[in-house]
Amino acid sequence: MNTTSISMTLNGQLIHAEVEPRQHLVDFIREDQNLTGSHLGCEQGACGACTVKVNGQIVRGCLVLAVQANGADVQTIEGLTADGVYKDLQQAFLQFNALQCGFCTSGMLLAGAELIETKPHASRTEIREWISGNYCRCTGYHAIVDAIAHVLEERQSNVK
């Protein structure tokens, strides 16, 4: 087996590993690092279930090879939720029933968190557009939009 040495900061921890050059980042995270919050869905980058952050931007983990993340700062849903910065978003997902089976939830939370960071005044239409790359078969999106809009409104009211 042909392997390549990589290093990355994964959820704040420096890790070193040997990976096959063709191994996808989400497979490395799930199988080798036992972080199973990101899911494999379509394996074509369309569904968003495999979403992770690489160097501060959300990417589809099924479209990025682990070797491409060499030297990168990678954050999974486990890392995003560990610091508590998005506890309000998690709570809103519960409050508004924005999750049912949970398969899309990690990707939706990462997309929602990125929206909150980059467009804190987003409208409901902008929220829908922002999360449009993430598929959810259970909720119909309305509850997800409600949850994200609620967090945006709450954070704005706390700023005033």
Image (cartoon, rainbow, N blue to C red):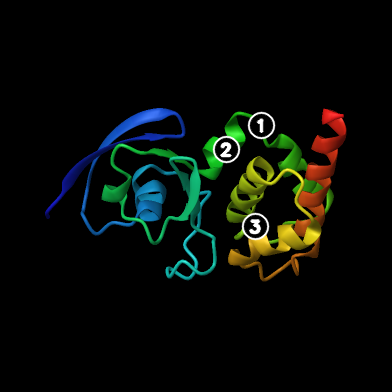
Q: Which residue is drawn at 43% across and 68% down?
A: 43
Q: Residue furthest left?
A: 2
Sequence-wise first label, 2 or 1: 2
Q: Name the residue under label 1.
A: 85
Q: Do the residues labelled 2 and 1 touch (CB within 8 Å)?
A: yes
Q: Where is residue 129 in the image (x, y as percent from the top left)?
A: 68, 64
Q: Position of residue 15 (x, y in %)?
A: 32, 32
Position of 2 with respect to 35 (left or right) is: left
Sequence-wise first label, 3 or 2: 2
User: Local crowd at mark 2 within 10 Å, few (<14), some, or many (≥20)?
Assistant: some
Of residues 61 and 102, which is closer to you in this image? 61
Q: Position of residue 26 (x, y in %)?
A: 40, 53
**Which amino acid type is marked by label 1?**
Val
Q: Position of residue 61 (x, y in %)?
A: 42, 55
Say which of marks 3 and 1 sits in front: 1
Q: Which residue is drawn at 54% across and 39% down?
A: 78
Position of the N terminus, as image quadrant, is: bottom left
**Which amino acid type is marked by label 2?**
Leu
Total numbered badges shown on the rendered structure: 3
How far apart marks 2 and 1 lie (CA) works out to 8 Å
Secondary structure under the numbered disc 1 in the rendered image: loop
Image quadrant in which you'd find residue 6: top left
Q: Which residue is drawn at 12% across and 53% down?
A: 2
**Which amino acid type is marked by label 3?**
Gly
Secondary structure under the numbered disc 2 in the rendered image: helix
Q: Are marks 3 and 2 in contact (CB under 8 Å)?
A: no
How far apart marks 3 and 1 lie (CA) works out to 20 Å
Of residues 126 and 82, which is closer to you in this image? 126
Q: Do the residues labelled 3 and 1 touch (CB within 8 Å)?
A: no
Q: Name the residue under label 2.
A: 80
Q: Mark 3 points at which residue?
A: 102
